[in-house]
Amino acid sequence: MAIPPAFADISKAANDLLNKDFYHTQAGSLEVKSTAPNGVVFNVKGKATHDSATSGSLEGKYTDAASGKSLLSNLTFFLSSPNPNLQHCIHYSIGIQKSEVNVLIFYRHAGLTFTQTWTTANSLDTKIELADKIAKGFKAEVLTNYLPASQKYGAKANLYFKQPNVHTRAFFDLLKGPIATIDATVGHEGFLVGAEAGYDVQKAAITKYSAAVGYAAPVYAAAITATNNLSVFSASYYHKVNSEVEAGAKATWDSKAGNNVGLEVASKYRLDPMSFAKAKINDRGIAAVAYNVLLRPGLTLGLGASFDTQKLNEASHKVGASLTFSA
């Protein structure tokens, strides 16, 4: 029996077709991925918006292979406990306005994944993950956020549990509220039912709730979702016509905004094993096209444009490009 998708992914097939790999949303973006010999994965991203604003991030990710051997370089290890499961502490410093970040990895042999990101907004984000060690299908995350300029902190904890026919998640914002968001999806023979609820511990009140139903088969999927306290309704459909063609559509109605229903349709065509093209259009007449090609192993180019078909003589159109390096 298959594991059902998370609540947010019940309509993932249609959402990905409608939203992913359309490059007009940014004037330009660059991504460089590389893996060091010691297993640390680096990811550098940069983007420029159509408003001439630029931003970027530097991410490093390391997964302990649970081999008992330390592969982390340029870090200082020292004995912190006679307990073999509490053997080592990782201490390092990052020079951000004389700020220092200390991270203690408790279970060195348990297979932790450690990810740290530094953005051009001077935000230092850290994530520590532990998967399939406490129980099969169980994953725990701790996320912290630090803004040195304003001395602001953030801390979150996430829990995931996946088993055949059930997929549950819990997200806790530890410093705001605290606020908890819990969702669950139950599946059986392709049929999916999911629900989500948010709870403010300090106010002792439910802050939001949503629900969804869907059906997923190997070549098609359909879903109906009700979000924003059951006030925004969406119906989506995805169909993999054949190995080369995919098609999808989504209709959305906001019961608080009026009677108008938004509609968007998209299609993807694989030109050859190395490239594909996508196109979409919505009820407002905004059309978008995209082209993605693998120039050579490790180098991918994406080109995209959007057009307001009702204002073709006006300068409301957008073009964008993306370049991804991977090594």
Image: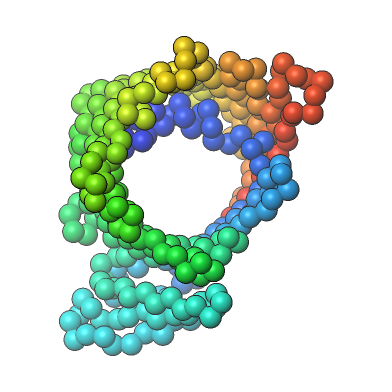
- Asked whether 238 or 235 is in front, the reply is 235
Q: How many marks?
A: 0
- Asked whether 170 or 299 is in front, the reply is 170
21 with respect to 53 (left or right): left
Q: Is residue 250 above or below residue 118?
A: above
Q: Residue furthest right?
A: 313
Q: Is residue 246 visible?
A: yes
In x, y percent, where is residue 153? 41, 64
Q: Is residue 241 above or below residue 304?
A: above
Instruction: Please name the residue shown 74% across and 29% down the image.
Output: 317
Q: Quadrant of the C terminus?
A: bottom right
Q: Is residue 129 visible?
A: no
Would you identify the image quadrant in which residue 104 lies?
Answer: bottom left
In x, y percent, where is residue 188? 20, 26
Would you identify the image quadrant in which residue 162 lies?
Answer: top left
Instruction: Please name the residue shown 29% across and 49% down the image.
Output: 179
Q: Is residue 296 above or below residue 291?
A: below
In x, y percent, where is residue 208? 30, 35
In x, y percent, where is residue 8? 36, 35
Q: Quadrant of the N terminus?
A: top left
Q: How is the image coloured?
A: rainbow
Q: Is residue 4 above or below residue 109?
A: above
Instruction: Please name the residue shown 54% across and 35% down the image.
Output: 20
Instruction: Please name the residue shown 65% across and 17% down the image.
Output: 285
295 with respect to 134 (left or right): right
